[in-house]
Image (cartoon, helix red, strand yellow):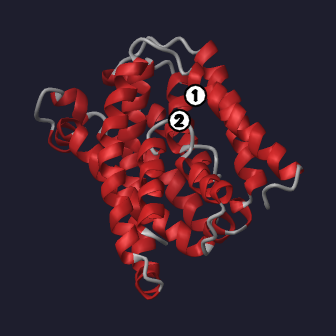
């Protein structure tokens, strides 16, 4: 992998990780469209580790929320402290299913047909949630059952193309949370799972990445993902305070349909 390719993939990672459009799906599709051929196992590890960039961006951006969750101190105080158990409970489904389906996710689920199809299917789910949800609840209203519901939504993100932020925001809005609150809670809930996935892949393939000369590209992508991820989080939270998620729904459907059309025409290989 060249430095230019690492820059491009790092930008894609940072831009798509926290938007409800699927970072995994884009990192699977973009190299195919550009004609870049990578070992899929190494690309999966590269993706998981470069997520540390977007993870660090989220940790720093939501540092006050995290302090409140862990200690009950800060601006959020007790309201933040109440999020600890919902976040823990909400993390369990993706951890259990991720470990149980790890091999399937890394191989059969990496098909572009599945990626494109899930982009469309979960876009429709987001559209339903956007249309039907009441969106009257704030961050202080999160309960244990909300954490479990959003956690189950996060488990669906194991399907490439579904989008972690997309499935968790869909579930959170279905529970009645405001758009910006849904995004904020979905990000906080995602942090443990993103860290665990990156740490697991780093330990598993650290020697393979080094042997394939992937250390420098991975570091470049991680730094780029951090910078772009920070900017994307800030923009999205401001955007959702006044705008619906319709633009993301339309984008996902268009991209998913385009990939399926290219597959049908033989321009891309599954």
Give the quadrant of residue 98. bottom right
Give left or right: position of 257 versus 87: right
Across and down, in percent, residue 46 comes to 47, 68
Residue drawn 17% across and 41% down? Answer: 67
Contact (Cβ within 8 Å) of mark 1 with mark 2: yes
Left/right placement of residue 223 relative to residue 123 reads: left
Q: Is residue 192 above or below residue 246?
A: below
Rendered residue at 43%/17% (across/down) = 178
Looking at the rendered structure, the number of numbered marks drawn on it comes to 2
Numbered label attached to residue 248: 1
Name the foreground residue: 208 vs 98.
208
The structure residue drawn at horizontal position 54% and vertical position 74%, both measured from the top left corner, is 42
- Quarter of the figure with the C terminus: bottom right
Q: Secondary structure at mark 1?
A: helix
Instruction: Return the x and y of residue 104 as percentages of the image width and height.
Output: 69, 67
Q: Can residue 195 be seen from the camera position used here?
A: no
264 shown above or below 18: below
Q: Nearer the viewer, residue 73 or 197?
A: 197
Residue 192: image tag: none
Q: In the image, 183: left or right of 102?
A: left
Residue 182 appears in the picture as rendered: yes
**Mark 2 lies on residue:** 20
Q: Residue furthest right?
A: 265
Helix, strand or loop at label 2? It is: loop
């Amino acid at each position: 992998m060249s430095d230019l390719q690492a820059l491009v993939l790092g930008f894609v990672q940072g831009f798509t990780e926290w938007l409800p459009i699927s970072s995994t799906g884009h990192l699977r599709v973009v190299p195919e469209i550009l004609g870049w051929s990578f070992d899929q196992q190494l690309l999966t590890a590269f993706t998981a580790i470069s997520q540390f960039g977007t993870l660090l961006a989220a940790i720093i951006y939501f540092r006050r929320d995290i302090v409140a969750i862990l200690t009950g101190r800060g601006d959020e105080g007790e309201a933040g402290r109440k999020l600890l158990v919902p976040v823990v409970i909400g993390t369990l489904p993706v951890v259990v299913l991720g470990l149980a389906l790890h091999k399937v996710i890394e191989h059969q689920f990496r098909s572009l047909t599945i990626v494109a199809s899930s982009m469309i299917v979960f876009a429709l789910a987001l559209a339903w949630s956007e249309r039907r949800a009441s969106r009257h609840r704030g961050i202080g209203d999160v309960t244990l059952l909300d954490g479990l519901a959003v956690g189950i939504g996060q488990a669906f993100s194991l399907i490439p193309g579904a989008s972690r932020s997309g499935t968790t925001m869909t579930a959170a809005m279905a529970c009645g949370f405001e758009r910006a609150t849904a995004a904020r809670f979905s990000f906080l809930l995602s942090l443990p799972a993103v860290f665990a996935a990156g740490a697991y892949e780093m330990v598993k393939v650290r020697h393979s990445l080094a042997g394939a000369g992937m250390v420098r590209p991975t570091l470049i992508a991680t730094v780029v993902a951090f910078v772009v991820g920070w900017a994307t989080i800030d923009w999205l939270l401001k955007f959702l305070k006044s705008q619906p998620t319709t633009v993301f729904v339309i984008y996902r459907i268009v991209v998913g349909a385009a990939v399926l059309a290219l597959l049908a025409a033989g321009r891309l290989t599954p």
